[in-house]
Image (spheres, rainbow, N blue to C red):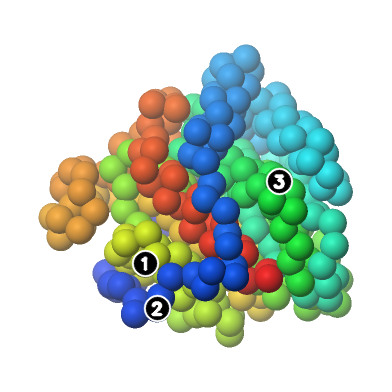
Amino acid sequence: MRILIALAAALMATGATTAQAAAPAALAAPNISVANVQAHLNQFQSIARANGGNRAHGRPGYLASVNWVKSKLDAAGFTTRVQSFTYGGATGYNLIADYPGGDANNVIMLGGHLDSVTAGPGINDNGTGSASILEVALQMKATNFQPTKHVRFGWWGAEELGLRGSTAYVNSLSTTEKSRIKAYLNFDMTGSPNPGYFVYNGADGQPTGSVALQQRLQAGFTSLGVQTELTNVGGRSDHAAFARANIPTGGTFTGAEQTKTSAQAAKWGGTAGQAFDRCYHRSCDTTSNINATALDRNADVIAYALWATAS
Ligand SMILES: [Zn+2]
């Protein structure tokens, strides 16, 4: 998640709960193990520790993160490729992973940024989204999910410097290739220590089709008994590059530097008057800076939304 430039007024918009029921049994999305997601976070922490304390663009901890995620996906049978780009005098990398099969003219993408800021290891921002979509990808294989649509994952470089990697990826696509991508779901900060449960507002200037993704993510939380609010993440994360290409987008978010209100604390627990993530963009964004319940719920909702969208 990038630095907030203009306070998003739409944060005031309340999504509340939806009336939608839980997933039909036929969807059968797996329950994602939060222990597995946390094991991936431990790996990111170790990579940062071994590489000067961060996983930032142009630093060795970033490429080590790419190589580690790639190794897990390669072992699971994904087709992976590393796309390089240049920003700020340094080479950046995106990792793209395709799950075998599905209709290549109907592509569902999930993504999150893999880079941290230079100040710290970036475990909540965005080890959480990166680790969660990795575990969901591995569970696709483990459960032999055979979606009708083609599923592709992206781990983006240099998000913290202005969405550089995701923008380079979208710009590299032909018009036809862009038109094949029917949805992009973004996960950037999903385990904030004083969590909120935010879903990207699909109606707020987002491409047609985004509201359906919003409602699917809300339905996932509803099935877990968790209330949500809508948020306008605007240009603060990588979905913006896809939205500019008129691809429907959605995502979840547990909050960054902004303060949890009393009403939100009453609804979600945690501490009113305190930031959702007091270690946002700081050296203390470590594996101690995670709310495991929020991480678990978001990972389950990611799987729910993917199974519902790609089946
Ligand atoms: Zn960030």
Measured from the top left, where is residue 239 in percent x and y? Answer: 59, 63
* Local crowd size for mark 2, using a 10 Å CA cut-off: few (<14), some (14–19), many (≥20): few
How many numbered circles are shown? 3
Look at the numbered discs 2 and 1 and tell me whether their residues touch, using CB distance below 8 Å.
Answer: yes
Mark 1–mark 3 Cα distance, whole angstroms, equals 26 Å
Type of residue at label 3?
Ala
Q: Label 3: state its secondary structure.
A: helix
- Say few, some or many: other residues with alpha carbon within 10 Å of mark 3 (under 14 / 14 to 19 / 20 or more): few
| Residue marked by disc 3 | 142
| Amino acid at dot 2 | Gln
Q: Of label 2 and label 1, which has the lower sequence position?
A: 2
The residue depicted at 58 percent of the width and 84 percent of the height is: 208
Disc 2 to disc 1, C-alpha distance: 7 Å
Rendering coords of residue 234 (x, y %): 48, 66
Residue located 85% across and 62% down the image? 101
Residue 222: which disc? 1
Task: Look at the numbered disc 1 and give the secondary structure of its residue.
Answer: helix
